[in-house]
Each structure stands twice: as C-alpha cells, then as structure tokens.
Image: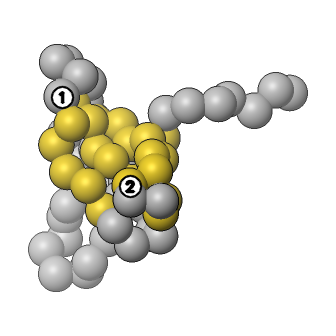
Amino acid sequence: MAVNKPVGDNARKGAVRKRSQIKIKLLGKDAWTKRNKKGGRFMAVKKSKKKFKGVRREGARKKR
C-alpha cells in the first residue's frame, strides 16, 4: 500500500500496489482505465488525457 506521510504534503511515496492502468478508446477518444490486478476487474475510467497518479501502466514494454 502507498505511504502518504506526512499528511497534507500532497505527495505519494511509492506506487499504488495491486493496480494497473491501460489506455483505451472511449467514444473515439483516448481514456485511461484503472484495473484491479487480482481479479482483472476494471475499477474506474478517467476521460481526461492525464493518467492516474502512482498507478503502473500496462501494455507495450520498451525494448532495451
């Protein structure tokens, strides 16, 4: 679980665990969808172009 201390500094220390996000097309526009890692259920959709904060992304990995 993410650590959020000290309270009120508006910053997360570390990533949100057991969550991932993926970019999808929603009504012809790009949207980010947050997914639960355990069951694979979709939890939330963000219609703006910004990603969810602190949630890792799925999909294509960069080759080194």
Residue 16 in view (yes/no): yes
Report whether 64 appears left or right of 44.
Answer: right
Q: Position of residue 57 (x, y in %)?
A: 48, 41
**How many neighbours does mark 1 have within 10 angstroms: few (below 14), some (14-19), or many (20 or more)?**
few
CB within 8 Å, label 1 to label 2 = no
Q: Residue at x 56, y 31 (%)?
A: 59
Q: Secondary structure at mark 2?
A: strand
Vertical comparison of 20 with 47: above or below: above
Residue 45, how many percent across, how many down? 26, 55
Binning the other alpha carbons within 10 Å of mark 2 as few (below 14), some (14 to 19) or many (20 upward) gives few
Quarter-of-image position of residue 5: bottom left
Quadrant of res 10: bottom left
Q: Position of residue 49 (x, y in %)?
A: 47, 70
Q: Which mark is residue 41?
A: 1
Q: Give the residue at x 38% y 59%.
A: 27
Q: In the figure, is residue 59 to the left or right of 52? A: right
Image quadrant occupied by the C terminus: top right
Q: Is residue 14 above or below residue 5?
A: above
Q: Amino acid at mark 1?
A: Arg
Q: Residue furthest right?
A: 64
Q: Looking at the rendering, in which quadrant would you find the N terminus?
A: top left
Residue 14 visible in the picture:
no
On the image, the x and y values in percent for residue 20 come to: 35, 37
Is 27 in front, or is 8?
27
Identify which amino acid the numbered label 2 is placed on.
Leu
**Picture layout, residue 30 above or below residue 33:** below
Q: Which residue is mark 2?
A: 26
